[in-house]
Amino acid sequence: MAFAPEEVENGAGLATAIVYAKPASVDPVADAVAHLTRRGRTRFAAEITASQEAHLLRAVEYAEGLARDRIMGIPRNLDQGLLMPRQYIVVNGLLLPETEVPLLWLYAVWEAAELSASGQPLGHVVEDKVNVTKETTGRALTTEWSGAGATKARRYPWIYRLLTPFLREAGEVQRG
């Protein structure tokens, strides 16, 4: 099963979009596979198409969850299904086109899809936090809580850094 064209956001601001693709593309799986294999990442590419689509959907939810409260600009269309594309995003003094999803945003989603395909958890809600210990392993910061209802959560700072050009500073008010 492939994503239907009306489910693929490539810059139109579709109300029914659930996944991102490059401009003028309608195959988000092929876009992600091409990007990740160029970077030597193979787990996502090795999955069957249905699994790849599920990983992409998880990755979109993860990226949008990281950015939702602080994203710059306004939606291109008021009824669009995803956070991007947006109007009035300025990065390094340049106004980004509102007719496409920025590549850094796509890279963040695709990297999160690779993590999902590798079995890494994307976004956990932690309740009953007690006795916090933090440990950095490679690129992932692992935070452990012990006690009733203890869980393990991971943050992926390089994915967040890919999204930061599109985010307002904490407490910054958007005018317009």
Image: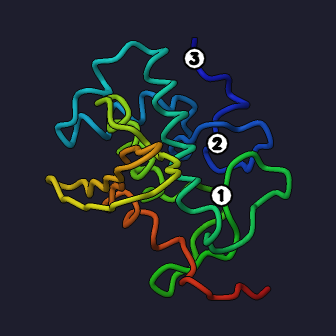
Which part of the image, by quadrant, shows the N terminus? top right
Q: Residue 9 has which mark?
A: 2
Q: Secondary structure at mark 3?
A: loop
119, above or below 104, in the image: above
Dots 3, 2 in contact, CB < 8 A = no
Specify the amino acid type for callout 3: Ala
Q: Earlier in the sequence, mark 3 or mark 2?
A: 3
Closer to us: 33 or 148 = 148
Specify the amino acid type for callout 1: Pro
Which part of the image, by quadrant, shows the C terminus? bottom right
Q: Which residue is mark 3?
A: 2
Tag 3: Cα neighbours inside 10 Å, few (<14), some, or many (≥20)?
few
- The quadrant where residue 57 appears: top right
Dots 1, 2 in contact, CB < 8 A = yes
Q: Which residue is mark 1?
A: 85
Horizontal and vertical percent for residue 141? Answer: 26, 58
Q: Secondary structure at mark 1?
A: loop
Specify the amino acid type for callout 2: Glu
